[in-house]
Image (cartoon, rainbow, N blue to C red):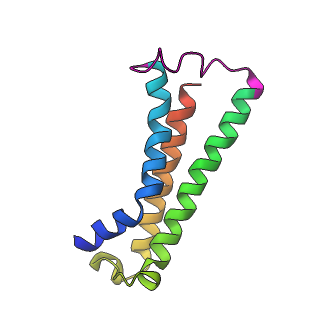
């Protein structure tokens, strides 16, 4: 359990970035509508640009997560969680789970465009 918390600590910036990306769209139509009014009134070209940059944010989060999961044990000296030590499938499953998380964050953001 402690090792998983250490990995989550190392993943704090990608996770916070994905959380901000996911919550920005709902906040613009919900609680902070008066603060962010007009933020999502875009033309089709502006929508394309925003979608492009949202995809870049999600991919940046994904690649930095993948680097942490693959190389944290070498750079920081962390051991792999016990469930990951048996095979390399554990790292691949974690990478796939984070990829889905970041794609969902970008999708939630783009839903409110």
* Secondary structure, magenta segment, majority class: loop
Classify residue 41 as left or right of residue 84: right
Magenta stretch, residue numbers = 30-45
Q: As displayed, is residue 35 above or below residue 6?
A: above
User: Which residue reaches farthest left?
Assistant: 1
Q: As displayed, is residue 21 above or below residue 71?
A: above
User: Which residue reaches farthest right?
Assistant: 45
Give the position of the C terminus as an image quadrant: top right
- Residue 69: percent from the left, percent from the top? 45, 71
Residue found 54% across the figure and 58% down from its top: 62
- Residue 28: percent from the left, percent from the top? 49, 23
Residue 111 lies in the magenta-colored region: no
Residue 37 lies in the magenta-colored region: yes
Q: As displayed, is residue 47 above or below residue 9?
A: above
Residue found 73% across the figure and 20% down from its top: 43
- Residue 34: percent from the left, percent from the top? 47, 14
Q: Nearer the viewer, residue 92 or 81?
A: 81
Q: How many marks?
A: 0
Q: Quadrant of residue 30?
A: top left
Residue found 54% across the figure and 64% down from its top: 64
Q: As displayed, is residue 13 above or below residue 32?
A: below
Q: Quadrant of residue 55?
A: top right
Give the position of the N terminus as an image quadrant: bottom left
């Amino acid at each position: 359990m402690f090792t998983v918390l250490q990995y989550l600590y190392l993943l704090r910036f990608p996770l916070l970035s994905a959380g901000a990306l996911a919550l920005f769209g709902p906040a613009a139509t919900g609680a902070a509508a008066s603060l962010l009014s007009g933020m999502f009134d875009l033309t089709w070209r502006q929508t394309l640009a925003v979608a492009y940059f949202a995809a870049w944010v999600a991919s940046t989060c994904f690649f930095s997560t993948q680097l942490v999961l693959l190389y944290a044990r070498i750079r920081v000296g962390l051991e792999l969680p016990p469930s990951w030590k048996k095979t390399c499938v554990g790292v691949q499953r974690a990478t796939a789970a984070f990829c889905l998380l970041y794609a969902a964050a970008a999708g939630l953001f783009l839903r409110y465009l």
